[in-house]
Image: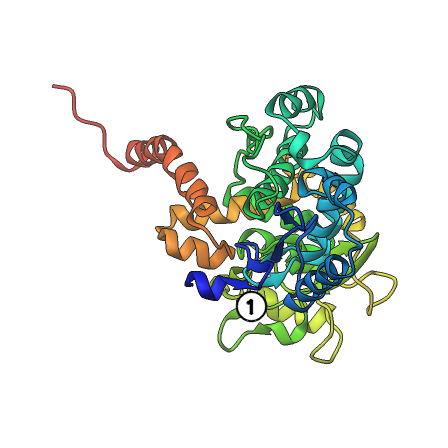
Amino acid sequence: MTAAAGRDKRSFGSIRRLPSKRYQVRFTAPDGSYVTAPATFAARIDAEAYLADRRREIDAKLWNASAAAVAKPNRITFGAYAAQWLADRQIGGRPIKARTRAHYRAILDRELLPAFGDRPLSAITPADVRAWYGKTLVNHPTMRSHTYSLLKTILATAMNDELIDASPCRIPGAGTAKRAHTIRPASVSEIEAITAKMPDRLALAVTCASWLAMRQGEILELRRKDVDLDAGIVRIRRAVVRVGGRLQADTPKSAAGVRDVAIPPHLIDRFRDHLVMHTRPGDNALLFPSGADAARYLQVKALYVDFHRARAEAGRPDLRWHDMRHSGLVLAALSGATLAELMGRAGHSTPGAAMRYQHVAQGRDAEVAAALSKLAAVDTPRQRVE
């Protein structure tokens, strides 16, 4: 974009489109000083209206320089800016999902606004951020990293909007959390043991989580029309999310989440039996509805009650529901799946997540080698001693 395209000059002011795609207004005050509007604008027409209002004030000699000084951008509070940031936030040109918005809103209300809400953006220093981080969510590393990442992202946008010169979020590694739970993937026999211990109507849910590496929300929204046994695939187009305490359908977690997952051939009959015995007629019939109402989603707590009992009876009480998806992706990596194939099967949009399963599979190479030696010991005749 040329300078002329990005900046609309007027006799006493200008409108500039920022990297955030919002519009910034600057104008010349009667004393010759250059003034920046105290906030950016989502639409150019709003920026133009603001600039016209300031021009009328100046022409009518109603300009209040002291009021303008108070309203300079460096007096915008974090709370006011964060509210506008959340309202305008987009990813890839699309508004963020309702569940993500609610998650950000909760973090702001619980952790960030009490600490920084009334502070001007320009008054938040690296020392302030370090002091806050040092005492925030110290026993909850994952939520701590999410909270810091949100603060850092908001302030990075403020920097792009030229409201602050630099971001005060400079703590190395604070936006990532080390895995607190070390996962020992379930073996094929353990997956099948857990499946067998589940109620018949929910056994296939474990199959979907493990062998097809589906996310929990994708499984709960699965409907008859999504299962194509002739093609041997499950079409994942939607997922259940909880927003405001209620379950509702949405698109998958990312664009990569919209995918077709091939059903391992030895499981085709398992899907066919479930459709015949546990799924109501009609394309929109849920595969795993609430036990009390076939039109309602199965509640996660109800699923967990049966899963926790089944995993304990199978001798793997350490496994979480998400660990079944992890186990399925490790099995896929062990089968020789490439990084791109793992990404496609799991619905990952970046290689980083898929790489984790390849690394785990590589780490089990010693176990595979030991198992091969046991096979060799059984099948190889002992050498004759002379």
Residue shown at 16% from the left, 20% from the top = 385
Where disc 1 sits, the SS reads strand
Residue for point 64% across, 69% down: 273
- Residue 33 sits in quarter: top right
Residue with the mark numbered 1:
234
**Which quadrant holds residue 49?**
bottom right
- 38 shown above or below 17: above
Q: Residue at x 52, y 38 (%)?
A: 185
Q: Nearer the viewer, residue 99 or 327?
A: 99
Q: Is residue 61 visible?
A: yes
Answer left or right for 264 relative to 32.
left
Check the image and report above or below for 268 versus 197.
Answer: below
Q: Nearer the viewer, residue 10 or 22?
A: 10
The way the protein has been coloured in the rendering is rainbow
Vertical arrangement, residue 146 with respect to residue 211, above or below: above
Residue 146 lies, in percent from the top left, at: 64, 37
Residue type highlighted by circle 1 = Val
Q: Nearer the viewer, residue 129 or 136?
A: 129
Q: Is residue 167 left or right of 134 when viewed as pictured?
A: left
Q: As drawn, is 313 to the left or to the right of 265?
A: right
The picture places residue 201, in percent across and down from the top left corner, at 73, 60
- The residue positioned farthest toward the right in the image shown: 292
Bin the neighbour count of mark 1 within 10 Å (Cα to Cα): few under 14, some 14-19, many 20 and up.
many
Q: Is residue 378 left or right of residue 92?
A: left
Q: Is residue 200 visible?
A: no
| Screen quadrant of the N terminus | bottom left
Q: Position of residue 193 (x, y in %)?
A: 61, 45
Placement of the C terminus among the 4 image quadrants: top left
The residue furthest bottom is 282
